[in-house]
Amino acid sequence: MKVSIVYHSETGNTKKVGEIIAKGVKKVEDTEVQCMSIEEVDKEYIEDSDVVIFGTPTYAGSYSWQMKKWLDTCKLKFAGKIGSVFATENYLGGGADNAELAIISELLVKGMFVFSVGSSKGQPYTHFGPVCIKDGTEEQKERAEIFGQRVAKSAKELMNR
């Protein structure tokens, strides 16, 4: 099973968190993962992926305009894939929940099945998706890695792979 992690990262923090999530995905047997910036996407890999996880920095309580533009204009087929999200912010209360919900809206419009793990697997909870302040505290990094593993494991179960 293939997993794509697609992100926009202005300072490198969102990229780092995407790479942490990828470490979690790699813990699931027979799963491949590729992290990519919206500036350098591997379209073929994304098309072949069962899961696409989207990451964004938080700006003014929402997601980056660069990610919005990319999602609005890309011609990739996301319908039927599992979609998940994560966000970074500069400080606690920076609007990351709003950013994640806004991307989730985009994913629903594109016909994706949205999976957040939520509280279904117990602690640590990732209500909409993991959030890290800057590139994350140790606890936030651990949550991001566990999130990646849980998304991949659940996707394999859902896809019967």
Image (cartoon, helix red, strand yellow):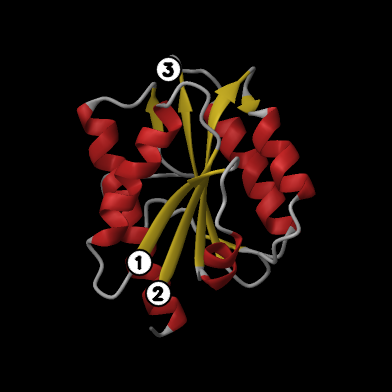
Q: Position of residue 111 (x, y in %)?
A: 71, 65
Q: Amino acid at mark 2?
A: Met
Disc 3 is placed on an element classified as loop
- Decide if residue 11 is in sight here: yes
Name which of mark 3 and mark 2 comes first in the sequence.
Answer: 2
Q: Residue lying furthest right in this view?
A: 73
Nearer the camera: disc 3 or disc 1: 1
| Disc sitting over residue 92 in the figure | 3
In contact (CB < 8 Å): disc 3 and disc 2: no
Q: Position of residue 65 (x, y in %)?
A: 70, 29
- Measure the alpha-carbon separation of dots 3 and 2: 35 Å
Q: In the rendered view, does 149 fall on the left or right side of 156?
A: left
Q: Position of residue 104 (x, y in %)?
A: 63, 48
- Residue placed under numbered mark 1 in the picture: 32
Q: Amino acid at mark 1?
A: Glu
Name which of mark 1 and mark 2 comes first in the sequence.
Answer: 2
Q: Closer to the camera, 9 or 111?
A: 9
- Measure the alpha-carbon separation of dots 3 and 1: 32 Å
Above-or-below relation of 47 to 118: below
Q: Position of residue 109 (x, y in %)?
A: 75, 57
- Decide if residue 121 is in sight here: no
Nearer the camera: disc 3 or disc 2: 2
Report the quarter where the N terminus lies: bottom left
Crowding at label 2, few (<14), some or many (≥20) Cα neighbours within 10 Å? some
Disc 1 is placed on an element classified as strand
- Residue placed under numbered mark 2 in the picture: 1
In contact (CB < 8 Å): disc 1 and disc 2: yes
Q: Identify the residue shown where x is 48% and y is 18%.
A: 93
Q: In the rendered view, does 112 fall on the left or right side of 87?
A: right
Disc 2 is placed on an element classified as loop
| Disc sitting over residue 2 in the figure | none
